[in-house]
């Protein structure tokens, strides 16, 4: 991944440099040619003014000095001819050439002697190379008395342009080197969290459910990805742990009733084998153990579903839901001589997954009715806290619990000493699992009537 990122960064940089530097190089080349031509034109005009008197008075020594001085200071070649094109002065005479040499056949001199400026580039057969030239006429009293030509080899211009291209190339290399270093840093910032996430995913895949990815500060996308991975890993760990707890709890809690039932069935088997009538106590005891195991399995399944289900809360009318559960339990309460009353305020709404609060209330009402003496009441009340959450309270008038017992009341299969044989010890654990699945909480504390009250905080 790091190589692909580097390749992408450098490719984009190269494309940008090509788009910018190539047009810039050509623009500078054209500008340099135009600037040199303009400078030569200016120098040619200045020389024509300086050479005017010397040509007119035929001062060859003065002419030769002027053209040589210019050639030494600037580097070009200066050629001065008379009105017929005959050579008058040359800053760089060719070996073996004579002073009577004629330039009348040169196109630039033909044009200059005709009274017009000539400029451009052409190949010199004499020198065997391309020339950039400017030729201007020397005029006296309206008559052309000669012409002067300044010329430079195009290699002079090309060298300057080449230096520009080399400079642009060096700049491109420097920019690429800088981009490469920055890209290495950026690629490390991007790939390091990805590598950490990949390592955590491999650990999780090998069965290490505690594996978590480090959440980077940036970029935001990887931060969200790592947080989502950790949430998923935590959820998976919770699910697996709940499955393990379910299997451990089931095997532990079912072992005792299974052993008891096995002994009773073996007694029945011996009685039948000996031709004796079956002891009804063994049969009733076996049925009771079956019923107990059934309650245990049902409770464990409800608890497992509460711990594993995904929360999908919806707005729920709490008063309406409580009224429905009171109607469902009123017959059982009447049999026990217990009255169920509700002071839940109308219009209270909470976000609850469908079925969770109903199941929690069923467990609490079952416990409260069984714990309350005949003639007492189970009260369901409501309030709100500072955060706007709904507090739903179920209180009874039973025997209550000690602080130590309250601390253990939510443990699985825990039952206080002296409790009857009808319960499984899972009721409050199920309530807590259902309410916490929707982001709420459950608290158990003594009530004002010497019993207990369970306070459920609903989001």
Image (spheres, grey):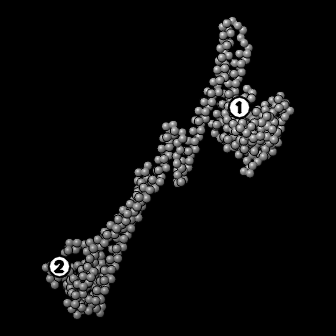
The local secondary structure at tag 2 comes to: loop
Disc 1 target residue: 415
**How crowded is the residue under tag 1: few (<14 C-alpha within 10 Å), some, or many (20+)?**
some
Say whether residue 420 is left or right of residue 143: right
**Which labelled disc corresponds to residue 60?**
none
Q: Measuring from the top left, give residue 168's x and y in whole percent.
A: 36, 66
Which of the 4 quarters of the picture holds residue 73? bottom left
**How crowded is the residue under tag 2: few (<14 C-alpha within 10 Å), some, or many (20+)?**
few
Say whether residue 344 is left or right of residue 424: right
Disc 2 target residue: 94
Q: Measuring from the top left, give residue 43's x and y in whole percent.
A: 31, 83
The foreground one among 145 and 370 is 370
- Residue found farthest to the left: 96
* 137, above or below 423, in the image: below
At x 28%, y 86%, the residue is: 47
The local secondary structure at tag 1 comes to: loop
* 310, above or below 5, in the image: above
Q: Measuring from the top left, give residue 129's x and y in whole percent.
A: 22, 72
Q: Measuring from the top left, give residue 156's x and y in whole percent.
A: 27, 73
């Amino acid at each position: 991944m790091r190589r692909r990122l580097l390749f992408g960064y450098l490719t984009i940089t190269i494309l940008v440099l090509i788009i910018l530097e190539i047009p810039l190089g050509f623009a500078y080349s054209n500008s340099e040619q135009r600037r040199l031509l303009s400078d030569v034109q200016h120098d040619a005009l200045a020389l024509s003014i300086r050479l005017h008197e010397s040509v007119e008075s035929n001062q060859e020594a003065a002419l030769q000095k002027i053209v040589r001085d210019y050639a030494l200071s600037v580097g070009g070649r200066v050629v001065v001819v008379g009105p017929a094109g005959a050579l008058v002065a040359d800053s760089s005479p060719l070996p073996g050439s004579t002073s009577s040499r004629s330039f009348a056949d040169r196109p630039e001199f033909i044009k200059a002697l005709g009274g017009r400026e000539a400029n451009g580039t052409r190949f010199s057969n004499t020198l065997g190379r391309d020339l950039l030239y400017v030729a201007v006429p020397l005029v006296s009293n309206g008559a052309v008395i000669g012409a002067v030509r300044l010329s430079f080899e195009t290699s002079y211009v090309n060298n300057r342009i080449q230096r520009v291209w080399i400079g642009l190339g060096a700049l491109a290399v420097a920019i690429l080197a800088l981009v490469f270093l920055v890209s290495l840093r950026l690629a490390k910032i991007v790939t390091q969290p990805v590598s950490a996430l990949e390592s955590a995913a491999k650990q999780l895949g090998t069965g290490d459910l505690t594996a978590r990815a480090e959440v980077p500060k940036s970029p935001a996308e990887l931060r969200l990805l790592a947080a989502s991975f950790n949430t998923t890993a935590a959820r998976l760990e919770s699910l697996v742990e709940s499955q393990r707890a379910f299997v451990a709890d089931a095997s532990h809690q079912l072992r005792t009733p299974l052993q008891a039932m096995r002994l009773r069935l073996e007694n029945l088997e011996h009685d039948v084998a000996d031709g004796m009538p079956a002891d009804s106590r063994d049969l009733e005891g076996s049925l009771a153990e079956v019923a107990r195991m059934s309650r245990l399995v049902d409770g464990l399944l409800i608890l497992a579903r509460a711990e594993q289900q995904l929360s999908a809360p919806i707005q729920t009318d709490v008063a309406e839901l409580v009224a429905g559960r009171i109607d469902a339990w009123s017959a059982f309460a009447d049999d026990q001589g217990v009255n169920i009353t509700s002071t839940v305020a109308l219009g209270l709404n909470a976000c609850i997954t469908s079925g969770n609060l109903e199941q929690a209330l069923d467990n609490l009402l079952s416990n409260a009715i069984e714990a309350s003496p005949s003639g007492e009441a189970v009260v369901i009340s409501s309030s709100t806290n500072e955060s706007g959450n709904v507090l739903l309270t179920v209180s009874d008038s039973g025997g209550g619990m000690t602080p130590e017992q309250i601390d253990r009341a939510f443990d699985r299969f825990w039952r206080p000493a002296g409790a009857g044989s009808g319960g499984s010890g899972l009721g409050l654990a199920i309530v807590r699992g259902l309410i916490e699945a929707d982001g709420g909480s459950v608290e158990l504390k003594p009530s004002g009537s010497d019993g207990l009250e369970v306070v459920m905080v609903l989001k």
